[in-house]
């Protein structure tokens, strides 16, 4: 597993493309997939945060998504696609719960979040990266795309 900073150092071009796709609409936007108790997938839109060399997520403590990540930390993240082309940014890894009141970087993560964080209702997770994939298309409907992949085990 790697932090965002380790991924960025190892694959700066992929990290730049990923950051661009996550923040393309202003606030960072993506879909977070977690594992339900029955083993099925659960997918949610959310705002991933890049700050302090990490990839972070604030999740409501009492939400199904939060319960999923505390029980089984595996996740997949997919950035929203651009309006004019089908480019993709995908990350797979494991989420580590972090107490935002104790995290050294919590204030910086909160400052980087484009929304208001409630009074202790959120759980902060650092999203550790195992694999990344970027698919680039020259035009909408192109097939196959150009793929670039990165794995923490390859670094």
Image: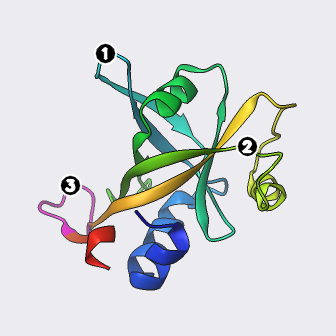
**Residue placed under numbered mark 2 in the picture:** 99
* Residue 7 can be seen in this image: yes
Q: Is residue 97 above or below residue 40?
A: below
Task: For marks 2 and 3, give the CA distance.
Answer: 43 Å
Q: Is residue 44 magenta?
A: no
Please name the residue shown 80% across and 50% down the image. Answer: 102
Give the percent coordinates (x, y) of residue 120: 82, 31
Q: In this figure, which residue is indicated by the disc labeled 1?
A: 38
The quarter of the rendered structure image containing the C terminus is bottom left
Q: Secondary structure at mark 2?
A: loop
- Label 2 or label 3, whichever lies nearer to me, is 2
Q: Secondary structure at mark 1?
A: loop
Q: Is residue 76 above or below residue 86?
A: above
Nearest to N terminus: mark 1 or mark 3: 1
Residue at the location (33% across, 69% down)?
A: 152
Q: Quadrant of residue 101?
A: top right
Label 3 sits on residue: 141
């Amino acid at each position: 597993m790697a932090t965002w900073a380790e991924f960025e150092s190892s694959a700066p071009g992929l990290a730049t493309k990923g950051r661009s796709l996550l923040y393309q609409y202003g606030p960072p936007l993506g879909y977070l997939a977690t594992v339900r108790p029955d083993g099925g997938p659960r997918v949610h839109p959310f705002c991933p945060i890049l700050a302090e060399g990490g990839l972070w997520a604030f999740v409501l403590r009492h939400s199904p998504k939060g319960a999923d990540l505390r029980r089984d930390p595996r996740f997949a993240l997919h950035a929203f696609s651009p309006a004019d082309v089908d480019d993709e940014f995908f990350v797979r890894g494991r989420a580590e719960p972090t107490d935002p009141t104790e995290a050294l970087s919590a204030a910086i993560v909160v400052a980087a979040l484009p929304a208001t964080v409630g009074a202790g209702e959120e759980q902060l997770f650092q999203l550790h990266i195992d694999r990344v994939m970027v698919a680039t298309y020259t035009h909408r409907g192109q097939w196959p795309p150009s793929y670039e992949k990165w794995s923490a085990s390859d670094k």
